[in-house]
Image (cartoon, helix red, strand yellow):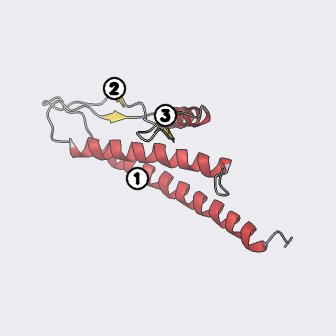
Amino acid sequence: MSMIDSAMTEALGRFLDVDVARYKLIGSNLANIDTPGFRTRDLDFRAELARASVHAAAGNFAANGEGLLEYTSYTPVVRQVRGLMQRPDGNDVSVERESLLLAETQMKFNLGVQLLKDEFHTISQAINSGGTAS
């Protein structure tokens, strides 16, 4: 474990992983707004964050091509969103809904990055203080 691998940095990393996964889904939904029959997909942020934490705590590792163990990446569970109004072509993507989710996801990401910066700042202060009390 390196100096920067704390419980907080790992938790924030998982938070950002789940947030980025949701960001990609929203982008995919918007990209397919004119695709006939396309159904809106999303993930349950809280459930996926908990699942990512369990995945990391379980120490999911696999051997790579060189025989070394590598952390297996987390893959979110994506679900179709039910109850949305469909257009005549069967597509149910709503620009308004996706735009709102995009703004929410961006705010969460900015919060996660800021918290991660604060954590690194705290680590930096501990290193630079040289163990002296301030």
Of all residues shown, which one is farthest toward the front?
A: 66
Residue at 18 percent of width and 32 percent of height: 87
* Residue 134 point in image, percent of width and height: 84, 73
**Disc 1, disc 3: CB below 8 Å?**
no
107 up-or-down from 15: above or below? below
For residue 103, the mark is: 1
**Disc 1, disc 2: CB below 8 Å?**
no
Tell me the distance, in whole angstroms, between the alpha carbons under discs 3 and 2. Answer: 36 Å
Sequence-earlier tag: 1 or 3: 3
Determine which quarter of the picture holds residue 29.
Answer: top left
* Residue 54 point in image, percent of width and height: 58, 32
Q: Secondary structure at mark 2?
A: loop
Q: Secondary structure at mark 3?
A: strand
7 up-or-down from 118: above or below? above
* Residue 17 point in image, percent of width and height: 47, 46
Mark 2 — residue? 82
Q: Secondary structure at mark 1?
A: helix
Tell me the distance, in whole angstroms, between the alpha carbons under discs 1 and 2. Answer: 21 Å
Single out the mark in the foreground, 3 or 2: 3
Mark 3 — residue? 62
Q: Amino acid at mark 1?
A: Ala
For residue 75, the mark is: none
* Residue 132 point in image, percent of width and height: 85, 72
Q: Nearer the viewer, residue 86 or 110?
A: 110
Sequence-earlier tag: 3 or 2: 3
Q: Around disc 3, counting alpha carbons within 10 Å, would you say few (fewer than 14), some (14 to 19), or many (20 or more)? A: few
Residue at 44 percent of width and 49 percent of height: 105
Q: Amino acid at mark 2?
A: Arg
Q: Amino acid at mark 3?
A: Ala
Tell me the distance, in whole angstroms, between the alpha carbons under discs 1 and 3. Answer: 36 Å
Q: Total marks drawn?
A: 3
